[in-house]
Amino acid sequence: MPNMSKEKHPMPSQAPEVRSQNFLEVALGYSEETAVEEARRCLDCKNPFCVTGCPVHIHIPEFIREVAAGHFEEAYQVINRDSSLPAVCGRVCPQESQCEGKCVRGMRGDPVGIGRLERFVADWHNAHGVQKTEKPASNGHKVAVIGSGPSGLTCAGDLARKGYEVTVFEALHLAGGVLVYGIPEFRLPKSIVQKEIDKLEDLGVKIETNVVIGRTITIDELMGEYGFEAVFIGSGAGLPKFMNIPGENLKGVYSANEFLTRINLMKAYQPDSDTPIQHGKKVAVVGGGNVAMDAARCARRLGADVTIIYRRTEAELPARREEVEHAMEEGIVFHFLTNPVSISGTDGWVSSIRCQKMELGEPDASGRRRPVPVEGSEEDLEMDCVIMALGTSPNPLIKSTTEGLETQKWGGIVVKEETGETSRKNVYAGGDAVTGAATVILAMGAGKTAAAAIDERLQGKEQ
């Protein structure tokens, strides 16, 4: 019989006063008993809307059925058919707006904890799994993947399973892209990312680090002298945006991209780290997305009093509700309907940030009500560090070194939606390099789409 409880089982986690002092993972994961009980809440619908909400179309009822029966390895193999990064997705995907958002149990209570079950299954496999992935026989075709983030790793994994000789080119010294430089250890342990990458290498995927496409090698060279028949661009969106207000060049002003890279990739929070970072006492984070929450929570763990400055209300925050709640629990202060207008400094260092109160006016192009300044409402907040978390755009390097590659005015690569192919034949793209900063799972979906199209092209299956 199904478990008809209206509430999903809570996720065990570190207490706020403890976790705000360390970089260990906040969520602790389900036990076997809890996972089985949560899985029994699934109604095993004949028309599973949850699957339509998943960008990579995992067979959700099937894997949950296996969990309910206590068949955890079998559940992992179901997920693994469609997802190269289950332990990652179970931690960072916005399930509430995707698979869980379409779960019928959510109509009269909580949806089934699909994300929590995916994480449990992946972690159980990593702890107990004995099956090593075998490299398929080569089909004789070579494909290059630019970038080792979620879109690139997914494309590489899907192609490798079909026998393609895949080489991933990564600009940084570690593979993983935004999974290693952008998402903090307390949300996504880097050991988890490395295990997922190890599985892809078992499939035969080669990963070349410290290779900057457009400088070290160009796409034309990859498809020429290096003999790659197709290229997938999954280079992400790592070019940070700023407000262009007075004082942004002061010392102590970071982009969230730099701040998080120093902490997550270079381990600047460790006492013996070679990478310097300012341990501010009073830190302002400007923005309201997941990256802003990550930057604020990292600064809190470095010992700062942290304030998030956001120009709309709490209801309009684009960050996941869970991340907002965790930030609030950890003592981070939110200043809503507030927007910076300048930053002041002393001896070249940040000393304060001047903000103006806002009110919501008519909706803008995004459909959200536009923030309008309130005259005469400026105030100065004492700060010694400011982190700008305003979004990112693709680096123009690949565009500037690749002839005939069409891009949007803001830098995103133009692709055919159904295949991911760019204006250059046999050159495909996906993820943040196309959409701008978005979610891990959407990037993975784009990688799957491109992999399928590349396979059809190189195998002559196109209609």
Image (tube, rainbow, N blue to C red):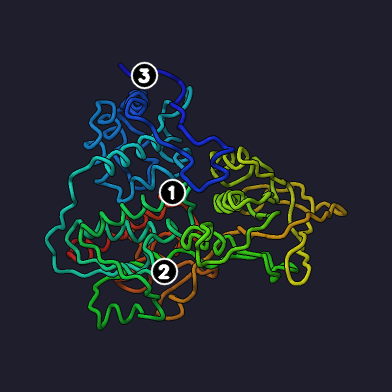
Residue holding disc 3? 3
| Mark 1 vs 2, N-terminal side | 2
Label 2 environment density (alpha carbons within 10 Å; few <14, some 14–19, many ≥20): some
Q: Is residue 365 left or right of residue 351?
A: left
Label 1 environment density (alpha carbons within 10 Å; few <14, some 14–19, many ≥20): many
- Amino acid type, callout 2: Leu
Image x and y of residue 249, in percent = 69, 71
Residue holding disc 2? 172
Q: Which is closer to the viewer, label 3 or label 1? A: 1
Residue holding disc 1? 188
Query: Residue at 23% of width from left, 65% of height from top?
Result: 457
Q: Secondary structure at mark 1?
A: loop
**Quadrant location of the C terminus?**
bottom left
Q: Is residue 341 visible?
A: yes
Image x and y of residue 382, in percent = 78, 56
> Contact, CB < 8 Å: mark 2 with mark 3?
no
Q: Residue furthest top?
A: 1
